[in-house]
Image (spheres, rainbow, N blue to C red):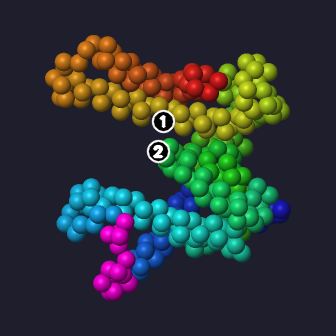
Amino acid sequence: MMSAGWSNAYGSFTRRATARFIDLAVVLLVCASFYLADFELGFPLKYSTLFEYRPVLSFYIFMTYDFPGVSMTFIAVKLFLVFPYFALMESGRWQGTLGKRLMDINVTGLDGDRISFGRATARYFLKTISAVLFMLGYLISFSDKRQTLHDYLARTLVLKRNVSPGYYAMPTWSSRWMFETPGVSASEHAAASQGYQCAFCGHRENERSLHCQNCRASIPLGETRVVLGLGLMNGIIFSIIGTVVLIIGVRVISFVIDGDTPWPIDALIFGVGFLFTAGGVSALFGKNWLARLLMVLFAR
């Protein structure tokens, strides 16, 4: 357990990002070493035995004609190099990778103890969710303990040792962004982010429940601060999707087919674009009606 006084504090965004870049450099150094060894031996290892191999004359040729080989190489590196590196070291005695070690941070369970290899494995692959959602799972804090989305789902923490909690105090209200200075700690925000909230109707309760007592949604109530973080993520994602759809609509009408599209298609494209844009902007102000509508259509 974490002791009082000079003990653990939550790892900041800058420390975690710096550690990530260091670990990326370590992985690239290992990959470069394999490539140089292969080069010195005359490339005995290449994908020509499985895929059509062509000399790399340009990036376009590389990605077009050898994309299966590139994909398989990427997957192999992730599974046989990057995954063991992160999972073994974060569950090992150091409780962190070389980058985390240099940044004086480590990965623990919610009680501050060392995590198992299975928990470290889950945390590694859950990073995919944080990454594919426009990297928002890394940036948005889902609790007042600076957990990323994959930290929250894996029930892990990233801690920095030997820092005075009095100096490195966290606010009582969860920050919306996982930056160095995480938001304000106003009492009204602290009160508003406590308890549990229904993702469908927004009803809040003091205790976790498997069903909302207000709308009877068949999903468990989530922590209010986590639901707020997911709402912010929805706002950014929906805004991006809506903007992209509107841009595509303008390009289709103006440049691709010179405005000869039937009006129902034009109306559909711009309708979807405006719907997602309006839903995204409103979600940034706490109104998650679009997310609830999508959940009603696809999850109920």
Badge 1 crowding class, 10 Å Cα cut-off, few under 14, some 14 to 19, many 20 or more, is many
Q: Nearer the viewer, residue 236 or 160?
A: 236
What is the secondary structure assignment of the residue under circle 1? Answer: helix
Say whether residue 208 is left or right of residue 68.
right
Going by the image, does 234 lie left or right of 67?
right
User: With respect to residue 132, does 244 lie above or below?
Assistant: above
Q: Is residue 58 visible?
A: yes
Q: Residues within 10 Å of mark 2 (few under 14, many from 20)?
A: some
Point out which mark residue 134 bears: 2
Residue 55 sits in quarter: bottom left
Is residue 145 magenta-colored? no
Pointers 1 and 2 in contact (C-beta within 8 Å): yes
Dot 1 or dot 2: first in sequence order is 2
Measured Cα–Cα span from mark 1 to mark 2: 9 Å
Residue position marked by numbered label 1 in the rendering: 236
Whether residue 171 is visible, yes or no, is no
* Highlighted range, magenta: 36-50
Residue 25 horizontal/vertical position (percent): 45, 71
38 part of magenta stretch? yes
Give above or below for 260 relative to 85: above
Query: What's under tag 1, amino acid-wise?
Result: Ile
